[in-house]
Image (cartoon, coloured by chain):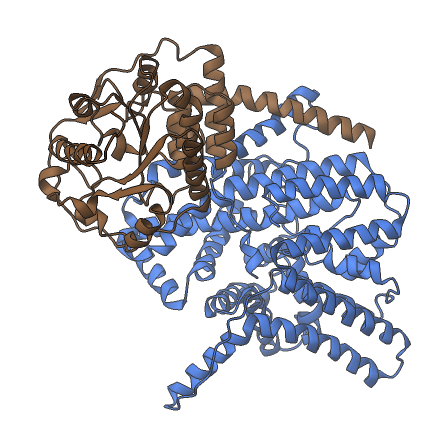
Chain colours: A brown, B blue
Amino acid sequence: MRKFAINIFSFTLFAMVFYIIALFLWGSFAPNVLKPNINYRIGSWGHMHSRIANIKNYHNVDILFLGSSHAYRGFDTRIFSDSGYRTFNLGSSAQTPIQTKVLLDRYLNALNPKMVIYEVYPYTLSIDGVESSLDIISNDKNDIHSLKMALKINNIKTYNTFLYGLMCDFIGLNKTYTEPISKGTDRYIAGGFVERKMRHYIPTQLKKKEITLNQIQIKNLAEIVNMLKERNIELMLTYAPLPKANYYRYTNNNYFDSLMGTYATYINFNKIMNLDDSLYFFDADHLNQNGVKKFNAKLIELLKNVPNKNK
Amino acid sequence: MLFNSIDFAIFLPIVFILYWFAANRNLKLQNLLIVIASYVFYGWWDWRFLSLIVFSTLVDYAVGLKLKTAENKTHRKALLWTSISINLGLLGFFKYFNFFVDNFTAAFSLFGTEIKTNSLDIILPVGISFYTFQTLSYTIDVYRRKLEPTKDIIAFAAFVSFFPQLVAGPIERATNLLPQFYKKRPFNYAKAADGMRQILWGLFKKIVIADNCAHYANLIFNNSADYAGSTLVLGALFFTFQIYGDFSGYSDIAIGTARLFGFELMRNFNFPYFSRNIAEFWRRWHISLSTWFRDYLYIPLGGGRGGTLQKVRNVFIIFIVSGLWHGANWTFIAWGTLNACFFLPLLLTNNNRSNLDTVAKGKTFPSVREVASMFLTFGLTVFGWIFFRANNIEHATSYISEILSPSTFTTPEFEGMGRALSTILLVILFVALEWRGRERQYAIADIGSAWYRPVRWSFYALIVFSIGMYMPSVESPFIYFQF
């Protein structure tokens, strides 16, 4: 029995070391099709790498934007700057509350915002957050918060990518990487916004579906709300405009609205703005620059109407 | 609790440590620990159905004791039928009630008579078909005086509920497993190490092969109307490896886990896809069920003796019942019937007992004749699996019709075809390893036995790595849990 116990323990250690080395080699040299459970995408779509690199230049902002691509493609920091707001946009692809929590843990102290505008969307509150965690692991440093995020998500793809990311950080493989400002039709704007070259959406019919919210995401949302409350940071939840075809595909928007209203000030812009699908969007999810201008103007108008707000 | 879950990864070491360190001096205590662990294992899924196992255990224990003292033939028969009726009655209710009610109603409506019936919302208790057959084997063997009835209720409860094989077999015979609960089981290093190796291989089969194949098999079968025949052939092949990896993987984990506790379970799979005819396939696939039906149904019916008509009848009965055992659906009956049709020519030409050895024994490559016979048998098996996997008979027939159309000669195409490449490569590697180890208990049983330890461990660690690299994001239950 003693021999068995020693061998099991030794093999476990051996297998762990083997796993880490094999993961690094396989992750670095195997073609993507052969490594489905490592998805390390440094400089991926959404300019997360540039955003993180940019963050050190921002302190004591008036507004911090958070959320999915609806946030980093929807809140144009230049427009807010023209209105006298110093803002930073910390959105990331399909960002769920689990990732938002990690980003706040890391950057809230440094950015020290007076207000947080958090873009919420039924989809990001219904998913497990695996894919969106990979974006943050690949493009930001990996620390204890990343580990906590991986444990919360509890998915092999997140664990593998986190381990791979740790090794890349440790060896310093990413130190020399610089993300281009323009990639395809996207251009990174200082402050976190990503501008898409002007295009128009051709609306299509989308299949109706009812959203079932993920309780882990809801729990994390509640934690974010409490965290900001404890620091006396004002929070506004927003449902950014969507093309009607996409917005009305969700059959339980009213339920979503009433739930979000229980957490903080909540504005569903789909109810207070009427944007034409083919004029103000570039795809089924995102506003084009004309739509961004309209949306941001409306938001600024609302912020200004609230006395003594954050300017 | 699933074998491929974190829960089990925590549960197994705890039970192992308690078994060998806290209860190792007392056999009764070890058996009691097995009963408690087994009930926890089963109750993890739904504790309410534990009462069924306990009830079944008590009935067969009592019947066994009564059979010991009963000399009168009628009395003994009555006792046997009490056990059979109660066990099969429970199985029939939970598994077949709605099926029979629905078909009864449909049959009457064919004659223009509408009957109002209500289907019940019945949950099928996991593993009921397995432990029912296991406990029945005890009563039948005691009735046949092949086995002394046990007075040890703890040992008997442990035999019925033994957690490694409780929910998906192998379906153990009382004559093999029960006596192992009476004897002291000293820890055996070689046996435990081999058990760990078999568990590792079982996890690889389940997580890497079966679960990845399942993704594509489900995609293609669930949207079969959208695909060309060539894609449907690929879908059937994916399912073929899914079901083998899933079920034989479970059996490997079960046998390996049992070995950690000093038990030897019967072999359940013997490289069935290398069979040279259907009779050989059935000697190598789900061996514990096939031999159960052989011993308790086929032979009592007369087996291969008697006239041609009787032989044909027996073959059809055994295969149809075997199909029905898998589930209350006409697809399983069709699958059983189909296999009976494949088997019958071999029986009638006295070829059903050919190919008793391993294909290409002692050689690296098979002969051309062996390759041809393996391909033919594999083809028939894949064809049969279409019925097994289809949602209903119409689905199966439309699936096969498309395969028989010219679209089978086009390039297969489906969503995620590129990603399926890694699964196809893994299956090829898997088949190569299985071929290499086909004369062993399981494919990697002897790999590395003569190697320098770091090299051998690297091989096992590579299997661990491939599990981490290719396991799907969501853990899937074992297919045979539903049976």
In the image: residue A307, left or right of residue A173: left
Res. A226 visible in picture: yes
Identify the residue at image location x=38%, y=51%.
Answer: A212
Q: Position of residue B400 (x, y in %)?
A: 36, 60
The part of the image, by quadrant, that contains residue B206 is: top right
Q: Nearer the viewer, residue B431 or B20?
A: B20
Residue B480 is situated, as x and y percent measured from the top left of the image, at 57, 56
| Location of residue A193 with respect to B115 vertically, above or below | above
Name the foreground residue: B218 vs B449: B218
Q: Quadrant of the C terminus of chain B?
A: bottom right
Q: Quadrant of residue B363?
A: top right
Residue B312 position, x and y percent, is 57, 74
Is B417 on the left-hand or right-hand side of B349?
left
B117 vs B33, left or right, is: left
Front residue of B153/A60: it is A60
> Residue shown at 87%/43% (left/top)?
B24
Please provide percent x and percent y for residue B410. 27, 46
Let me know if residue B450 appears in the view: no
Residue found 50% across the figure and 53% down from its top: B377
Q: Quadrant of residue A45?
A: top left
Q: Residue furthest top?
A: A176
Q: How many marks?
A: 0
Question: Which is more toward the observer, A134 or B236?
Answer: A134
Say if B325 sits above or below B86 in the image.
above
Specify the farthest residue to the front. A307
